[in-house]
Image: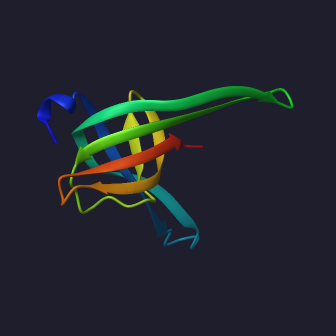
Amino acid sequence: MRAGELNRLIDLLRYTVTKDSNTFEDIETETTLATKVPAKVTFRSGNEAYLRGVNIQSQVLLIQTRYRTDVKVTDLVKYDGERFQIDFIKPLGNRKGLEFTCTVAP
């Protein structure tokens, strides 16, 4: 993967669930897995619709990064102030890179 193509910076986030020691409720916290990861970001598709008076937007991103072993499908990508849910991870070559297919996180 050529370095010149990785011209955007993304953050990788992970949700962790812990139990509250007083109420024993599940608490979901967001932790930063990695910051300022060089990436190539391509917008694949997007649409906007109104459903029962509510504006619904969907956007599909294709993100390519260098190869990492710590990324899971349950993780999130933060790009340009928005959070995107990783839907699919595809390895590129023999440990050369990763390609994430992402949609806007709810």
Closer to us: 84 or 2: 2
User: Compared to 40, does 100 lie above or below?
Assistant: below
- Residue 29 quadrant: bottom left
Q: Nearer the viewer, residue 36 or 25?
A: 36
Residue 8: percent from left, percent from top: 26, 29
User: Which residue is at the front of the view, 5 or 10?
Assistant: 5
> Residue 106: x percent and y percent?
60, 43
Q: Position of residue 95 (x, y in %)?
A: 18, 59
Residue 51 in which image quadrant: top right
**Quadrant of image for the N terminus:** top left
| Residue at horizontal 14 percent and vertical 28 percent from the top | 4
Up/down of 81 relative to 70, above or below: above
Residue 67 to residue 20: above or below? above
Q: Residue furthest right?
A: 52
Quadrant in the picture for residue 90: bottom left
- The residue shown at (22%, 57%) is 68
Residue depicted at 21% across the width and 33% down the height: 6
